Amino acid sequence: MSKKLLLEHINVPNILGYEAYRSKGGYTSVEKALKTMSPDAVVEEVKKSGLRGRGGAGFPTGMKWSFLAKPEGVPRYLVCNADESEPGTFKDRYLMEKIPHLLVEGMIVSSFALGANTSYIYIRGEYMWIVAILEKAIAEAKANGFLGKNILGSGYDLELYVQTGGGAYICGEETALLESLEGKRGNPRIKPPFPAVKGLWQCPTVVNNVETIAATPWIVNNTGDEYTKIGIGRSTGTKLISACGNINRPGVYEIDLGLPVDEFLNSDEYCGGIANGKKFKAVVPGGSSVPILPAELFYKTANGEARLMSYESLSDGGFATGSMLGSGGFIVYDEDQCIVRNTWNFTRFYNHESCGQCSPCREGTGWMLKVLHKLEHGLGSMEDIDLLWDIQRRIEGNTICPLGDAAAWPVAAAIRHFREEFEWHVKNPKECLTRNYGLKKSTLEMSFN
Amino acid sequence: MGMIKVTIDGIEIEVEEGTTILNAARQVGGKIVPPAMCYYSSLKGSGGKCRTCLVRVAAGSTKDPRPMPKLVASCSTPVMDGMIVENTSNQEVLDARKSIVEMLLINHPLDCPVCDQAGECSLQDLGYEHGLAKTRYEFKRRTFENTDIGEHVKLHMNRCILCYRCVYTADQISEGRCHGVIGRGDHAEISTYLEKSIDNDFSGNVIDVCPVGALTDRTFRFKSRVWFTNPMNISRKCENPKCCGKAVAWMSENNILRITARKDENNEVKEFICNTCRFEKKEITDWTVEGPRHIERNSVISQNHYELKPKHNFKVLENTAKQ
């Protein structure tokens, strides 16, 4: 049983309201931080906790905060990235929907630590109903003196705003998000300068994921050292995993980092095993951008060690035999699922969501999509598989923002681990239209005991 | 501003702090200069988009000599003291550039035989140097309708590489931008919103900054191939205070076929001209002829006869202009 730091009070009646949240110890971190701690002390606690960015890249949050430039007379901003649009990821939505005050509390504590007097929650346009939930929570916090001028008599002012995006995946990239927040076209900026130096309106800015910010109140309340006791190695604390696909119990789970993958996938407490008695074929462990892993590589690393749900263990072996924890969008495939079709679907998404600013991503994603369309519909040739490999290689690393990499990785991993399936599509052009290719070597029989 | 040392392809130079790798390379000149399709030195904020200028940074600086993990866009990466940059000396860079050129060309119509830009097109030069002889793209190319944006400018969206130069030009050179990029991904296009036309004194400059044939001069449409024309440096006193009045006339016999601003060796305009000079003063008598234009840039149009003396005696005409 994992410890619950974020979702502990999620089933308390009326937790959406201020009273219930407050009665469960809500906003105590604000009181503690503003009354007894200096901003630097809060940053220090977060540094000690080893908290890493929950949006995908896993960059240490304390370090990111300490990079923030602090020139005199220039305002600083904290922006919460709630533009959760990675296919397979729906953890932030759950958190904001169920316990909005936790995010508001986190925003106050984090803004105080960074010295920001204006902060934003940038939320994707599709989460329209959550905007109302958040705005109600902000109004309640303000009515109770946790937002506005001179919070709790400490002399610290903070205004918190919710801004909706137009529903573009690219606006989840931090600099595109800032452009969009400024009211411009959501094109990623050329870096350097980084947002920590020149971000929102050319002022120093920190952009953090919802889950990262929601983790800060617990750290302030219980100290960073306590936080490091949860988790394993450099993967400290808990992580929300949104599990979906062919499993018995899809949903959002809060796990201690370091949980064995076998337990996560097969125990009844979490995913509950593969649905309908099918065999387990493959998994995308961290949202659609991360490489897909076949069953045997998911359970055991190339060295034969049992894999754990942690940043290090999931990326063990690099992209050749590993993947990434990413944003925690856990997508499971059973033996009936077609990897070619799945890759085609992912590529269609990236093609649609590319901003069109830089050439490799704009042209390359469309090209990959067309080649994959051919392969999936039984019109491809063996050369097309090599061509596809070559195109993804030419996109990766050559683009302005990580969307190019995110488009290239799933294609690369699918060819790397499931080349036979691509070849089967070429060799059986008629059959591939009507049935999927269950790949024996990747469907292991394994159960949790 | 202090001076710092940087090594590009084995050549060490001293440049001002804050200079980008591309501009440092341009100070040396020659083969080591990475090609740039979107960066334009006189337009603030341009660059970083086309990715043709990618280079390898083998050592970040003297302080931190680690190499940069990815190839970087030389037009937007500032140099550091002791930085070692590899451009043409690195096969990985050349391969990446080849990839970018291939990507830029897969949806390009390759209609050079009927394109007014042919001969002075950056994409043509780039394709000539880094492109493949045969395309690996076997699908239908994406197409857009050709439109007239404004009285003088023709937009061939099919040829566009989305460098955003014309957008920056409209923002920074002319007053009131009414065109921009709409849509995203491979369906992003340059457009005037709701078929509005571009109408201001400096709109013609978008033609000059366009690296390809996407924005062309309607008054020069299908008049001549550029390599059959004689470029002459011309100037006049322009009433518009923002216009420099220095231009190039592309002539055939005694007729001015078109007028452009003057481009330097990097194919960039430093001083822009107004629409009156560009589109309305098409008589040689409107101008003072300074002499033949030397095209420094390595391109199709610099290959042949521009260094020759003009066939006609312009002296008379020059005098007429002065009167």
Image (tube, rainbow, N blue to C red):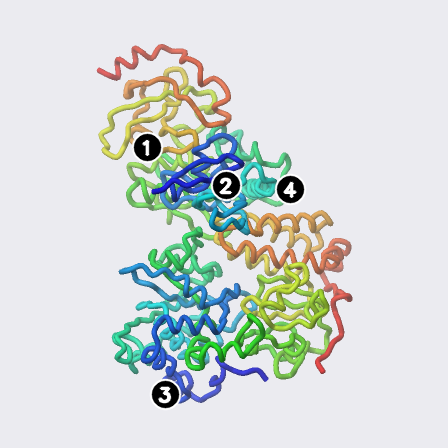
Q: Is residue A402 left or right of residue A131?
A: right
CA gap, disc 1 and disc 2:
24 Å
Write down the residue under mark 3: A19
For the residues tagged 3 and 4, is the chain the same? no
Asked if marks 4 and 2 fall on the same chain, the answer is yes
Query: Which residue bears the numbered disc 4?
Result: B136
* Alpha-carbon span between mark 2 and mark 3: 58 Å
Q: Quick check: B266 above or below A39?
A: above
Q: Which residue is mark 2?
A: B53
- Horizontally, residue B104 falls left or right of residue B274, namely right
Residue type at mark 4 is Arg
Q: Secondary structure at mark 4?
A: loop
Query: Image point 34% across, 42% down: which residue?
Result: B1
Image coordinates of residue B3 in percent, x first then y, are 38, 40
Q: Nearer the viewer, residue B93 or B279?
A: B93
Tag 4 and tag 1, C-beta contact below 8 Å: no
- Report the mark closest to the observer, 1 or 2: 2
Where residue B257 appears, as percent x and y from the top left, is 39, 23
Disc number lying in front (4 or 1):
1
Q: Judging from the image, what secondary structure is the residue with disc 1 in?
A: loop
Question: Are discs 2 and 3 both within one chain?
Answer: no
Query: Which chain is home to disc 1?
Result: B
Query: Which type of secondary structure does the marked residue at label 2 adopt?
Result: loop
Report if the CB atoms under discs 4 and 2 are less than 8 Å apart.
no
Which of B48/A46 is in front?
A: A46
Question: Which residue was labeled with disc 1?
Answer: B271
